[in-house]
Image (cartoon, rainbow, N blue to C red):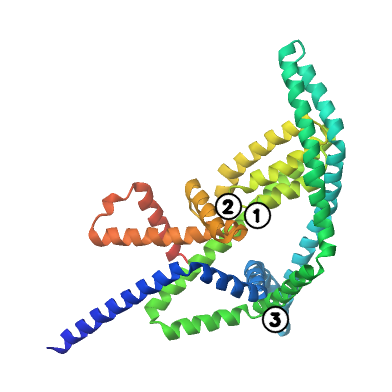
Amino acid sequence: MKKEDWKKIFYQSLTGFVSLALAILLFFAIRESGRIRESFQWLLGVLKPVVYGGVMAYLLKTPCNFLEKRILAILPQKHKKRANGLTVLLVLILTFLVIYLLLSMVIPEMVSSTLILVNAVPQKMDEFAKWLTGMLDGNEVLQTYANTAITSMEHNLQDWAKTDLLPTMQGMMGGFADTVGSVVGIFYNLLIGVIICIYLLLGRKTFARQGKAVLYAVLKSDRADAVMKELQFIDKTFVGFFGGKILDSAIVGLICYLFCIIMTFTMGFPNAVLISVIVGVTNVIPYFGPYIGAVPSALLVLISGPLNCAVFVVFIIILQQFDGNILGPSLLADSVGLTGFWVLFSITLFQGFFGFTGILVGVPVFAVIYDMIRRMVVKGLQKHGKMELLLDEARDAEIHFEEKVKNK
């Protein structure tokens, strides 16, 4: 046999062996999925400070790069070496200041508002009953049904507030003092995570160069270039999504605050700052965030009267329509590019695997996977001459993506 025939047989045998090995490995991975998950959770628990530090460093990387350019422009030549350290210090100070301001505003207001809500339930229910009875004046049948429903709702709401809500709040506040070991563990992980975050931010350029050097040392230049483009696209997708989502949530919270301030002077809305923070922060959660934030906010507004609560609910619906159809797409269009169905699908899928973390990162991760599959499909159709199977919208989206890659 010729040498080429032996090579062909060798590569075919190697391919078959690798395929069989992967199939066996997949079988045992599915069979031992419980142990693998436990091992992964154990490893994740050990590396939790590193994970915290890596996530914080990645989120703060963009503002660090942004501020470093401005600081380099104003620093004298002899002090430019200190620009990176000054940038990291400034970003950390601003981050801790923002967190401190949010916590100092939200926690006291949340506790006091919960206590006020619990104590104001009987009075507000009476006022609501009188208001509804006045609206139904002249219709005795509807008044009877309304009074029965209000009485039942009042008892249920009081029982829920006393037996569930208030003890939960007290348990949350007292739990921090009782579970000292848990608090120490969390504080330790966060402290080590902050230290790791500082090291990663200070050496972010060095780590990037080292990773790039390893990549080009292991792979051929064309393969390494393809991997670098893919990593740049992934980074752009994640940074664009989280940056756009944070900006979108800040704008939503600001609009809500302006509305609540106006309503405070005209209709007596309470807790404008707390309500705006709740609406803005929960808006970071894709898809379900607006509904999660609307419920406690509406209960806080209910303290000042049912009419105010109804006005606030209508405002939240209009605000979320504006955010979902105008503001959000304009800020996130280039970073995600998923339809509403795929957004809901990605949140549901990753929430099942990773819980709350999956809700936060599911959309950008799925956007990257979706884009990879889409490009594979397009290349396959081009190879087989079946591009007519694609719709015009899909071809336009692929052309738009290729233009973005070329402009990187």
- Pointers 2 and 1 in contact (CB under 8 A)? yes
Residue assigned mark 3? 80
- Is disc 1 surrounded by few (<14), some (14 to 19) or many (20+) residues within 10 Å? some
Find residue 307 and name its label. none
Viewer-closest of 82 and 17: 17
Using the image as rendered, state which of residue 172 and residue 238 is in the foreground. Answer: 172
Q: CA distance from mark 1 to mark 3?
A: 30 Å
Apparent side of residue 5 relative to residue 285 in the rendered image (left or right): left
Q: Amino acid at mark 1?
A: Leu
Quarter residue 125 falls in: top right
- Left or right of 333 in this view: 278: right
Badge 2 amino acid = Leu
Q: Residues within 10 Å of mark 3 (few under 14, many from 20)?
A: some
Measured as percent of width and height from the top left, residue 208 is found at 56, 79
Which residue in the protein does label 2 denote?
A: 331
Does residue 262 appear anywhere in the picture? no
Residue 263 at x, y percent in the picture: 79, 36
Q: Of the residues shown, which amino acid type is indicated by label 3?
A: Lys
Q: Residue at x 82, y 49 (%)?
A: 167
Q: Is residue 228 left or right of residue 40?
A: left
Crowdedness of circle 2 by 10 Å Cα count: few (<14), some, many (20+)? some
Mark 2 to mark 3: distance in Å? 34 Å
Q: Secondary structure at mark 2?
A: helix
Q: Earlier in the sequence, mark 1 or mark 3?
A: 3
* Position of residue 333 measured from the top left corner of the image (x, y, whole percent): 52, 52
The residue labelled by disc 1 is 247
Name which of mark 2 and mark 1 comes first in the sequence: 1
For label 3, the SS is: helix
Distance of label 2 from label 1 (alpha carbons): 8 Å
Q: Earlier in the sequence, mark 2 or mark 3?
A: 3
